[in-house]
Each structure stands twice: as C-alpha cells, then as structure tokens.
Image (tube, rainbow, N blue to C red):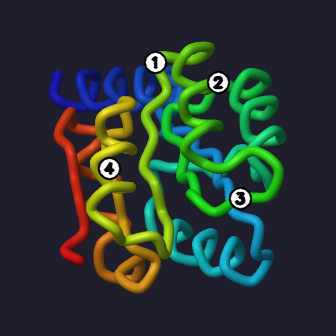
C-alpha cells in the first residue's frame, strides 16, 4: 500500500509544472547586468526571462513578457527608471518592482516607493540585500536597503 501511495505521489509530481518566479532585469551597464544574473543563478525557483538596457525597452519587455518581478535601475538612458516604473505599473499592475540602483537619496527612495515599487536595493549592497529583498517582496512585504 505504501509503495502505491509513493508511486502515485511521484507520478503527480511529474505532472505538475514547476513554478518559477519570472524576472526581468533592467540595467544599462552590461557588466553589472551580468553580475546580477550570476547572483540570481543560486536561486532555483527563479528564471531571468528577459533583459533591457533602457527605460523604453523596459516598458516594452515588461508588456511583452509579463514578468512576476522587475529589477529596475533608476539611472537609465532615454526614459529613467522612475518614469519607466510608472508606465509599467499602469500596464502591468501585477508585476512587482524592486529598484536596484546607486541612487540612495531619501527623496528618490520615497518617490519610488510612493509610485508603487515594492523594494529598493542600493547597488553597493546587492551582494547581501538583493536575494533577501526578492524573498520579502515575493512574500508580500517591502524591502529597503540601509543607506
């Protein structure tokens, strides 16, 4: 009887699709974007589904890919990250945004959170704060790096 139950559980596990958090990384500096991708590789339950190098591309990719989570820089060419986030959240309100940026002024942090971002991570603290920030945001909390 136990073997039948175990066999049935294994069969059901094979039928269930794996659930991944789908991530869009928006960063104009190629080397830093690669660093972020390497940090994210340690998490088995996430997938980077796209990248963007500027704010307009971020809006387009978000609409095209419908990511669960967007890691977004503030200082982007063309359309800055704050403006891109406003557009993305209008089009894709179910996507969560974590700003990952070198901007650490209180005014920018408050503006980002007021517009609907769920997290704010200083680039200097990405190695220690990014994964905990993602976990917090995906569980429904907000996260702000110490500045």
- Residue 120 drawn above or below residue 5: below
Which of marks 2 and 4 precedes in the sequence?
A: 2
Is disc 3 placed on a helix, strand or loop?
Answer: loop
- Residue 61 point in image, percent of width and height: 78, 34
In 3D space, how far apart are the residues under numbered discs 3 and 1 (Cα atoms)? 23 Å
- Residue 145 point in image, percent of width and height: 24, 68
Viewer-nearest of labels 4 and 3? Answer: 3
Question: For residue 76, which numbered disc appears in the image?
Answer: 3
- Residue 50 drawn above or below residue 64: below
Q: In the displayed orientation, state which residue is furthest to the front.
A: 107
- Residue 132 point in image, percent of width and height: 26, 63
Which of marks 1 and 3 precedes in the sequence?
A: 3
Name the residue that disc number 4 marks: 119
Image quarter hosting the C terminus: bottom left
In 3D space, how far apart are the residues under numbered discs 4 and 1 (Cα atoms)? 15 Å
Which residue is found at the position 17% from the left and 40% from the top?
141
Name the residue that disc number 1 marks: 94
Q: In the drawing, does residue 56 fall left or right of residue 36?
A: right
Which of marks 3 and 4 precedes in the sequence?
A: 3
Is disc 1 placed on a helix, strand or loop?
Answer: loop
Viewer-nearest of labels 4 and 2? Answer: 4
Tags 2 and 1 touching, CB below 8 Å: yes
Q: In the drawing, does residue 66 fall left or right of residue 124?
A: right
Q: In the drawing, does residue 127 fall left or right of residue 63?
A: left
């Amino acid at each position: 009887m136990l073997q039948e139950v175990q066999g049935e559980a294994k069969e059901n596990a094979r039928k269930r699709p794996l659930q991944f958090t789908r991530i869009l990384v928006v960063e104009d500096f190629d080397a830093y974007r690669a660093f972020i991708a390497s940090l994210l590789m340690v998490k088995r339950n996430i997938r980077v589904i796209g990248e963007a190098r500027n704010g307009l591309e971020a809006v387009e990719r978000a609409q095209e890919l419908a990511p669960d989570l967007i890691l977004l820089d503030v200082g982007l060419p063309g359309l800055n990250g704050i403006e891109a986030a406003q557009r993305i959240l209008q089009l894709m309100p179910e996507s969560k945004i974590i700003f990952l940026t070198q901007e650490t002024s209180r005014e920018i942090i408050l503006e980002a959170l007021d517009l609907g971002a769920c997290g704010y991570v200083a680039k200097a603290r990405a190695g220690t704060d990014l994964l905990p920030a993602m976990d917090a945001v995906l569980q429904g909390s907000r996260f702000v790096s110490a500045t």
